[in-house]
Image (tube, rainbow, N blue to C red):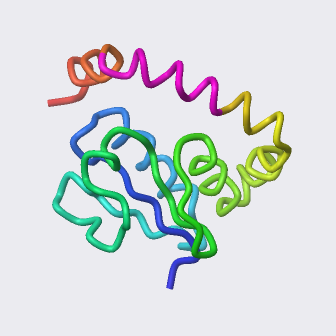
Amino acid sequence: MSDLIVWYDGACPLCRREIALMRRLDRRGAIRFVDIAAGAGGDCPVDRKALLARFHACEDGRLLSGAAAFAAMWRAIPLLRPLGVAARVPIVLALLERAYRAFLIVRPRLQRLAERSAPC
């Protein structure tokens, strides 16, 4: 059984690339990845629209979103664990959340670019 649940948008080319990388790095199988675009995600207490708007994870029974969810995912992957542990410092997490919110503004444009560059 996975220690961490991560919900992601499998219809998003950026998300698919990110999750593909995380799957390769998660050699222990510590993360259960749930593609909400494929209709999964029913075990999440957040509605589908909210799941698609922000990144979500459940770590130790706590629902996390945004930078906190990314940090939880990083903590589950040995190579990225130092970044996830650093995010436990409130100022670091606040800075990561600020960067994540800025990313959300440009995400639609980046998705279009990723779609165009995806192999056929």
* Residue shown at 54% from the left, 42% from the top: 66
- Residue 18 x/y as whole percent: 45, 41
Q: Is residue 71 above or below residue 62?
A: above
Name the image quarter holding residue 55: top left
Q: Main secondary structure of the magenta part?
A: helix
- Judge from the rendering whether residue 88 lies leftward or rightward of residue 116; answer left or right: right
Which residue is rendered at x = 60% and y = 56% of the image? 73
Above/below status of 17 relative to 71: above
Q: Name the quarter where the C terminus is drawn.
A: top left
Q: Which residues are magenta?
A: 97-108
Relative image position of residue 45 (x, y in whole percent) = 37, 67
Q: Is 14 rendered above or below residue 76? A: above
Q: Is residue 37 left or right of residue 104?
A: left
Q: Nearer the viewer, residue 61 or 24?
A: 61
Residue 82: percent from left, percent from top: 81, 49
Instruction: Check if residue 96 falls in the magenta segment.
Output: no
- The residue located at (34%, 50%) in the rendering is 51
User: In this view of the protein, which residue sits in the foreground, 62 or 2?
Assistant: 62
The quarter of the picture where residue 3 lies is bottom right
Of 13 and 4, the residue lying toward us: 4
Please provide percent x and percent y for residue 12: 27, 37
Magenta segment includes 103: yes
Of the pair 60 and 78, the residue shown nearer to us: 60
